[in-house]
Every structure is written in C-alpha cells, then in structure tokens.
Image: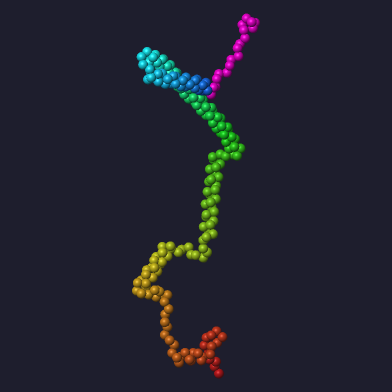
Amino acid sequence: MRRIFGTKKATEPPPTMDQAVDKLNTRGDGLDEKIRKLDEQLAQHKQKIKTTRGPAQEAAKRRALVVLRQKRLYEGQRDQLYQQQFNVEQTAFAMTSMQDTQHMVSAMKAAGKEMKTFMKDNNMKIENIEKLHDDMSDMLDYHQEIQDVMGTAFGVPEDIDEEDLMGELDALEDDLAMETATGGSVPAYLQDVELPAVPQGEQTQAQAQPADEFGLPAIPQRT
C-alpha cells in the first residue's frame, strides 16, 4: 500500500519571526557587500576615464555604465529588502505585544480569582464594612458624651445666664479702662482705704484694758 499511495511527508514547522529577520539580515549584508565592490570598480573606471583619451576612454565609460546599472539594481533590491525587514520586525513586535497582553490577562484573571476567594473566606462584604463603620462612629460619639459628663463641674447652678455673665464681664472691663484713663492703675474697689488713726489716749486705754480668752475686752466683774 505504501508503494502505491506513498507515505505522508512530515511537515516542517514554519520559521519563527526571529529566523525570518536573521535571513533578511544575511541577504542585506550580501547586497551591501556587492554594492561596496561595485563602488570600488566605479572608482577605478572614473580614474581611467580621467587618465585616458580616445577609444580607451570610451571603453572605460561603457564599463562604468554597466557597473553603475548593476549598482542601481542592487540598491533597489536592498531598499526592497529593508522594507520587507521592517514589515517582519513590525509583525514580530505586534506578536510579542499580543503575547505580553495574554500573559497580563492570565495574571489578572488569577489575581481576580484569588481576591474573590479571599473576600469570601474572610466574609468581607460591603454591608459588613458599613456596619462596622457605623458602630465605630456611635462608639466615638458615646465616648464623647461620657467625657462631657465627666467634665461637668459640681455645684454650679444651672440657672446662670451666660449673657448676664458676659454683660457683667464687659462692665468690669469698662471700669478697668476708666480707672486707667483717670490715672489710677488699680480700681477703686481694689484700692486700700486709709482709716483714721486711733487717738493716743484711747489707744493706751484700750491696750491697758484686760482681754478675755477670746481676745475681747473683758467684762468687769461686779464686787
């Protein structure tokens, strides 16, 4: 059967993008080498054209034209090869970008799956987080109320009007300003009052009178 129908040939794998770029680079290097050799030949023909006359000069010109046509042909092939190489490199870049994108998508899928599992295992739901936030806010408010109660002074009357206190404070400030303007540095109700001196006779009599155990003048005893 194999002799009649033959066997299926093994298909070779297609070349990679790197192999295609390397092959184009090799062909480009070969064309560059050919163009370099033609440039050397053109330089020799130009020198002959300058140094010869007559038929020899004409022959040198014809050979120079042939070399110049070959050079233009190779230059066109090289430009076409450079364009092909550019297209292959662009394709390779696009393929690499697609592979990188596929890797990133796979990594994101794995991360998303892991995040879902983590949130499910730890019961991380938005309603639970909101409830926790509300509970913490209530606890802080309750704590502030406790601090306000603890900071309330004992024995302070509750019927004191703050406006009356502020008015009395303003009046006190006006009195201080008036006393300062009139030349006194201390208000009248804070100054020391000079009392009249005790007469000498009365002071001697008061000192001579005995005092009781409380320091008061003793009551004379009747005999």
Q: Where is residue 96 in the image (x, y as percent from the top left)?
A: 52, 27
Q: Where is residue 34 in the image (x, y as percent from the top left)?
A: 47, 19
Taking the view exactly as shown, the residue that stands out farthest to the left is 182
Q: Position of residue 27 (x, y in %)?
A: 50, 20
What's the residue at 43%, 86% (across, down)?
197
Query: Dividing the picture into quarters, in which one does residue 49 lie?
Result: top left
Vertically, is 154 above or below 12? below
| Lateral position of residue 137 relative to residue 185, left or right | right
Q: Which of 184 and 14 is in front in this view?
A: 14
Vertically, is 187 above or below 34? below
What's the residue at 55%, 45% (across, down)?
132
What's the residue at 60%, 12% (across, down)?
9
Q: Is residue 91 visible?
A: no
How many marks the image carries: the answer is 0
Taking the view exactly as shown, the residue that stands out farthest to the bottom is 223
Vertically, is 218 above or below 22? below
Q: Which of 71 and 114 is in front in this view?
A: 71
> In which quadrant is the N terminus drawn?
top right
Magenta segment's dominant SS is loop
| Lateral position of residue 212 relative to residue 186, left or right | right
Taking the view exactly as shown, the residue that stands out farthest to the right is 1
Q: Is residue 9 visible?
A: yes
- Look at the image and give the residue range highlighted in magenta: 1-20
Residue 109 part of the magenta segment: no
Q: Position of residue 44 (x, y in %)?
A: 42, 20
What's the residue at 39%, 68% (across, down)?
173
> In which quadrant is the C terminus drawn?
bottom right
Colouring method of the image: rainbow
Residue 7 part of the magenta segment: yes
